[in-house]
Amino acid sequence: MTKPRTRSTTVPAATTIAKELRARLDADEDNEHAALRAQVEFWDKFRPILAANDASVGLEALDALALSVLANDDELPPVLDNTVVIDPHPDASVRGVVPAHPLFSFIASPYHGKRPSARGSSKAVGPAKKKQRQLRLAPSILQNLPAHVSAKLRADLEQLEQAASELGTVVVRLAYR
């Protein structure tokens, strides 16, 4: 049983075959290898188009494949053994439209999460209005004043509280000892 050949064992063979093909094309005086020359010229013009985007990957694998096809040699079988990603030229890139997908595209569905209405009711009734909360009044600073507070201090605190209410603010009583 023979061991199958991999690309890593044929790299020297590929270099040798490439040199033989180049020598054959250079020594061709009577245009005997015109088809091979046309194929090599085609690939020579096609390679820069494929490599126009720096994000393209695996062009060396395409070169090896083209060499094996042009060589037509049993020692170098035409095998694409690496991943090849060819991106278009950046100038030719056009922003596309994302196609719709039933799961990943937001499409308003007719279901809104509400229960169906009762069978007998034909009149639509809106939701009950929420009661507006009333703001609690801040406790007056006059509340819980000790009995021994002088009348002048009480009058001053009343004036302070009235001035604050006119300004729309409240007087805050700090706890102290």
Image (cartoon, rainbow, N blue to C red):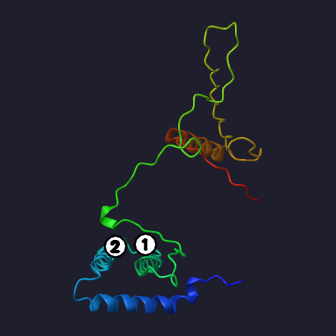
Residues at discs 2 and 1 in contact (Cβ within 8 Å): yes
Q: Which residue is mark 1?
A: 56
Image position of 152 with respect to 48: above or below: above
Label 2: which secondary element: loop
Q: Which mark is residue 154?
A: none
Q: Residue 104, percent across and down?
A: 57, 46
Among the 4 quarters of the image, the one containing residue 5: bottom right
Among the 4 quarters of the image, the one containing residue 157: top right
Is residue 7 found left or right of 59 in the rendered image? right
Q: Residue 8, percent across and down?
A: 57, 87
Q: Nearer the viewer, residue 153 or 74?
A: 74
**Whole-Å distance between the Cαs marked 2 and 1?**
8 Å
Q: Amino acid at mark 1?
A: Ser
Q: Residues within 10 Å of mark 2 (few under 14, many from 20)?
A: some
Is residue 165 found left or right of 113 in the rendered image? left
Q: Nearer the viewer, residue 168 or 107?
A: 107
Q: For the point 63% across and 34% down, which residue is it?
A: 135
Q: How many marks?
A: 2
Q: Quadrant of the C terminus?
A: bottom right
Q: Amino acid at mark 2?
A: Ala
Q: For the point 39% across and 91% down, which residue is it?
A: 20
Q: For the point 61% across and 18% down, which residue is it?
A: 126
Q: Residue 151, percent across and down?
A: 67, 43
Label 1: which secondary element: loop
Among the 4 quarters of the image, the one containing residue 26: bottom left
Is residue 19 found left or right of 149 in the rendered image? left
Q: For the point 61% across and 41% down, which residue is it?
A: 158
Q: Residues within 10 Å of mark 1 (few under 14, many from 20)?
A: some
Q: Residue 156, percent across and down?
A: 60, 45
Q: Quadrant of the N terminus?
A: bottom right
Q: Which residue is mark 2?
A: 52
